[in-house]
Image: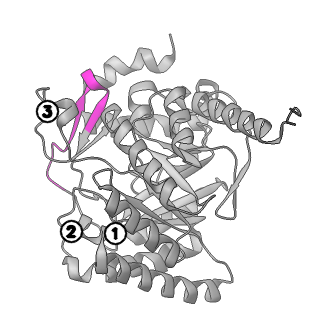
Amino acid sequence: MSPYALARPLLFALDAEQAHELTLGALDGAARSGLLRLVAGCPVEDPVEVMGLRFRNRVGLAAGLDKNGAHIDALAAMGFGFIEVGTVTPKAQPGNPRPRLFRLPQREALINRMGFNNAGVEAFVANVRRARWRGVLGLNIGKNAATPIERALDDYLVCLDRVYPHASYVTVNISSPNTANLRQLQGGDALRELLDALQARRAVLAAQHARRVPLALKIAPDLDDGQIAAIAELLVRHGVDAVIATNTTVSREAVAGLPHADEAGGLSGAPVREPSNRVIRALRESLPRGYPIIGVGGVLEAAHAREKLAAGATLVQLYTGLVYRGPALVGQCARALAQAAHAAQAASVAPTTPA
């Protein structure tokens, strides 16, 4: 039995958010002592170039676990090929009232309504600058809850200005269900105007810093095919470098009747796996060949990571799976994706036998 399997019942006896905070503190200590590397195993070396960046392997940490970028070095010791931290907002905000994080163990799921609780972009950048890890680091930006949706762009531009010099890539989060009206930014003129302004500001920042930082857009699983196709068209038109599919779902169909199923917030874990895969497949059909898709949602074992790749994802991210399976999941998924990618490459170059 793995060390995490032994610890999990103790963690699950605690309030979910208390356990989350305790775990992050324990990870810091385990990383400093070298114990975390022993538990997680040797990092998988499976280099791949995406968005002009060189990733150590295809498995990353999804945003949300380390909102303030305060635990980057410890998380890196788990063997991730890349790490994404945030979501950060211009000003510090407490998020929604507690309790706001709930486990649904019968379906290996979580419901959260955290509400972008974070210490603000200045504290976030200070934490990022203190980190020693030099791998691919994604910085995820959002808007303050108090900012009217019609002024959301102002918040995204403030965050982009501040995080740009420190990011390998920047993710624009417009898909959390826990900030009022945020998902309105996923369509039509609102998305067009947002991407227009971000692209223009990115051009200014690229000239200023002599470095073009890729932009990614994170979208929801609760979109229909028409909405997905429209988003794909705007991504290409505005030069966005990647799409992250997906955030949490507001659907409760897969958990109906379970304790906590009626709590407000976004549902993650096993129930979002297929909705996420559906969005990935639809994006793959609508986007140019090779356009980067980062697949996230419901990866609790290596086979689920391979599903994301088969659906059309280029890279995969984990979050809720770590809560249920622990650090070893990172290496398991990274090895599976390395094997799948290499097998696909070998098949594409295999000589054909003449008829």
Q: Reply above or below: 286 against 198.
A: above
Ranked by sequence position, the earlier of labels 1 and 3 is: 1
Ranked by sequence position, the earlier of labels 3 and 2 is: 2
Q: Reply above or below: 295 against 18.
A: below
Image quadrant where one finds the C terminus: top right
* Residue for badge 3: 260
In the structure shown, which secondary structural element does the residue marked by tag 3 occupy? loop
Q: Where is residue 5 shown, x and y percent of the image?
A: 44, 17
Q: Where is residue 239 shown, x and y percent of the image?
A: 54, 76
* Front label number (1 vs 3): 3
Q: Are marks 1 and 3 in contact (CB under 8 Å)?
A: no
- Foreground of the two, 71 or 108: 108
In the structure shown, which secondary structural element does the residue marked by tag 2 occupy? loop
Query: Label 3 vs label 2: CA separation?
Result: 24 Å
Q: Amino acid at mark 2?
A: Ala
Q: Are marks 2 and 1 in contact (CB under 8 Å)?
A: yes
Left or right of 130? Residue 151 is left
Mark 3 neighbour class, 10 Å CA radius: few under 14, some 14 to 19, many 20 or more: some
Q: Where is residue 19 shown, x and y percent of the image?
A: 31, 33
Q: What segment carries the magenta color?
A: 96-110
Left or right of 89? Residue 51 is right
Left or right of 253? Residue 230 is right
Residue 189, located in which quarter of the rendered image? bottom left
* Residue for badge 1: 89
* Residue for badge 2: 145
The residue depicted at 26 percent of the width and 34 percent of the height is 16
Mark 1 neighbour class, 10 Å CA radius: few under 14, some 14 to 19, many 20 or more: many
Query: Label 2 vs label 1: CA separation?
Result: 9 Å
Residue 122, located in which quarter of the rendered image? bottom left
